Image (cartoon, helix red, strand yellow):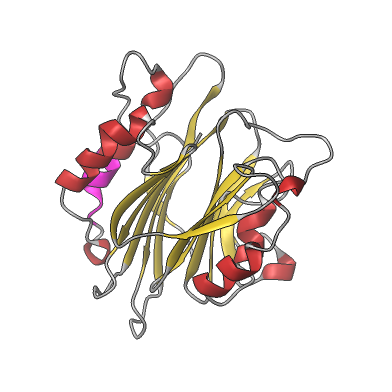
Amino acid sequence: MCTVVLLRRPDHAWPLLLAANRDEMAGRPTRPPARHWAERDDVVGGIDLLAFGTWLGVNDRGMIAAVLNRPGSLGPADGLRSRGELPLEALDHADAVSAAEALGHLDAGAYRPFNLVVADARDAFLLVGGASGRRVTATPLPEGLSMVVARGLDAPDSSRVRRFLPRFSEVGAPDPERGDWDAWIRLLASRDHDPDAGPGGAMCIVTDTGFGTVSSSLVALSAPGLDQQAIWLYADGRPGEAAYVPVAP
């Protein structure tokens, strides 16, 4: 389980704001976002040291890609490719439209089930694999606020969506130029949850099994023409405990 929150504002100087909490087994080794791939020197992302893919990355052309597990599919599986390859393959493309088109032709059966968000300053898509056979489906993401979780886009059967999407709607939008993400950070750090759903329904998951929220990201993509194309703040630990620090471009 992971969570991606997107705010799409096409006419704004910062048309895409994204927040993401990564939920994983605490012992899985990673390194914070950097240019880890010599063959993809235009990509910045966190690296998974078991499969050498990423859960979230951006490229120098102003595109972002993030992958989430679907329900009941935590961890790798023998004979299947790592889902961490998918953001890297998406970031080989110049924009979200071309990435969605190309990855829409993948064989979803080669991976465990996934949700893949690909976005730039103009367009955004959710690609889903493993929910309907071997076909990858691509859905444009709407303008305004959206939340992607394991169960999909704005999933009504997700207690996290029901609890937190209205809260993100109620708070003011971050101001990335001024570094003001405070309202979103408070929500990302929230351990509040529906008792019937258990701690997995919180934004920041803490359990006694070793599974939980292990890192968090805040990303803003700018409109064409601004000097700074992207802002990325990364917390290498639970939000509310680990500080968000700028990721070097």
Image height of 184 relative to 158, above or below: below
Q: Is residue 193 left or right of residue 89?
A: left
Residue 20: x and y, percent? 42, 46
Residue at 43% over, 64% down: 124
Image height of 128 relative to 140, above or below: above
Residue 202: x and y, percent? 36, 27
Residue at 74% over, 46% down: 109
Say which of 172 and 100 sits in front.
100
Q: Is residue 27 left or right of residue 199?
A: right
Magenta residues (range):
180-186
Q: Is residue 249 visible?
A: no
Residue at 27% over, 67% down: 9
The verdict on residue 3 being magenta is no
Image height of 183 relative to 123, above or below: above
Say which of 165 and 248 sits in front.
165
Q: Is residue 108 left or right of residue 93?
A: right
